[in-house]
């Protein structure tokens, strides 16, 4: 990201007014509807609402809200507009239920150019997952031209229709607009996604929180084919060279492989202005409960 974008981020951050003090990588936020949030905060605990349930077991939380909540707390405690969260890795080694949740964070490295933050996801006092975020100081790009794959050329999200709602009674947990490669089809998949509700009640979604929420979709995007989804991801890693602008985030499957019940999946990530990074997952073969 060039100097002009860095200056703009810092300027916007200084002008941004919030009802609750918080550090952010960017103060850009978009209004949400009055739908229930994924979480409500009670003291230092987060209480999941019913819309946080996952597709594998209705008594357990969705992977997207685990990654999203870890991202949220990292940004709340350690976000800095002079730094870009260049890498976020989330490990999900237990499936949390609807018991109260606590997110703890700690600084691993606090350097001038590089900061590393670890976070832990605790449910009912037990460790369920963790995250590591590497933050890099914004500066000028190095000179010269470097090869990169061509960006996608796809319809704008405004020109497409929402697919069926993810949720009960037509109330979506998030919005998705298919570009190509429908679920259940053997094809490369391209989609636009947007959030339909707040992650934590009273906190507008930031670009980094949006990335945390959509990151988990890298698994179904890359790991589903002409049969129902048969892999559950145990992690996700996102690499960013800039934060998304606007509410719509695009994902494009670019790789899948599986041997002995262990799969990998990789996707490019876009916003309406172009490519912003990539996401990769590892996953285990799993039969979805019906």
Image (cartoon, rainbow, N blue to C red):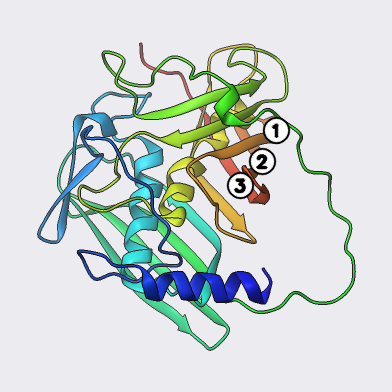
In the picture, the quarter occupied by the N terminus is bottom right
Res 256 label: 1
- Tag 3 near tag 2, CB within 8 Å: yes
Res 173 label: none
Q: Identify the residue at image location x=58%, y=16%.
A: 183
C-alpha span from label 3 to label 2? 6 Å
Q: Secondary structure at mark 1?
A: strand
First in sequence: mark 3 vs mark 1: 1
First in sequence: mark 3 vs mark 2: 2
Name the quadrant containing residue 76.
bottom left
C-alpha span from label 2 to label 1? 7 Å
Mark 2 burial class by Cα count in 10 Å: few <14, some 14-19, many 20+: many
Total numbered badges shown on the rendered structure: 3
Tell me: 58 left or right of 267: left
Res 266 label: 2
Q: Secondary structure at mark 3?
A: strand
Question: Which residue is the extreme one toward the left?
Answer: 43
Closer to the eye: label 3 or 1: 3
Mark 1 burial class by Cα count in 10 Å: few <14, some 14-19, many 20+: some
Name the quadrant containing residue 25.
bottom left
Tell me: 211 left or right of 60: right
Q: What x and y, as percent, mark residue 225?
A: 64, 18
- Tag 2 near tag 1, CB within 8 Å: yes
Residue behind mark 3: 279
Q: Identify the residue at image location x=67%, y=19%.
A: 181
Q: What x and y, as percent, mark residue 73?
A: 32, 61
In the picture, the quarter occupied by the C terminus is top left
- Of residues 42 and 164, the one nearer the viewer is 164
C-alpha span from label 3 to label 1? 12 Å
- Of residues 3 and 120, the one nearer the viewer is 3
């Amino acid at each position: 990201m060039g100097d002009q974008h860095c200056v703009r981020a810092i300027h916007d951050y200084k002008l941004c007014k919030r009802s609750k003090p918080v550090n952010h990588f960017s103060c850009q936020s978009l209004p949400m509807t009055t739908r229930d949030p994924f979480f409500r905060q009670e003291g230092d605990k987060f209480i999941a609402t019913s819309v946080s349930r996952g597709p594998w077991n209705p008594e357990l939380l969705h992977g997207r809200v685990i990654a999203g909540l870890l991202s949220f707390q990292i940004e709340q405690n350690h976000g800095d507009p002079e730094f870009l969260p260049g890498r976020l890795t989330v490990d999900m080694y237990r499936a949390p239920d609807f018991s109260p949740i606590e997110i703890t964070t700690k600084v691993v490295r606090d350097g001038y150019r590089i900061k590393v933050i670890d976070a832990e996801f605790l449910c009912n006092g037990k460790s369920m997952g963790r995250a590591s975020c590497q933050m890099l100081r914004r500066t000028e790009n190095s000179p010269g031209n470097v090869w990169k794959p061509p960006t996608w050329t796809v319809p704008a999200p405004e020109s497409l229709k929402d697919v069926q709602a993810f949720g009960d009674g037509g109330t979506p947990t998030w919005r998705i607009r298919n570009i190509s490669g429908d679920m259940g089809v053997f094809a490369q998949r391209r989609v636009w996604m947007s959030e339909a509700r707040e992650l934590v009640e009273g906190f507008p979604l930031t670009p980094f929180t949006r990335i945390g929420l959509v990151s988990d979709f890298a698994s179904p995007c890359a790991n589903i084919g002409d049969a129902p989804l048969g892999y559950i991801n145990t992690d996700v890693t996102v690499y960013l060279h800039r934060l998304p602008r606007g509410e719509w985030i695009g994902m494009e499957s670019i790789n899948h492989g599986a041997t002995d019940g262990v799969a990998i999946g990789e996707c490019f990530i876009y916003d309406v202005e172009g490519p912003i990074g990539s996401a990769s997952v590892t996953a285990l073969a799993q039969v979805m409960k019906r």
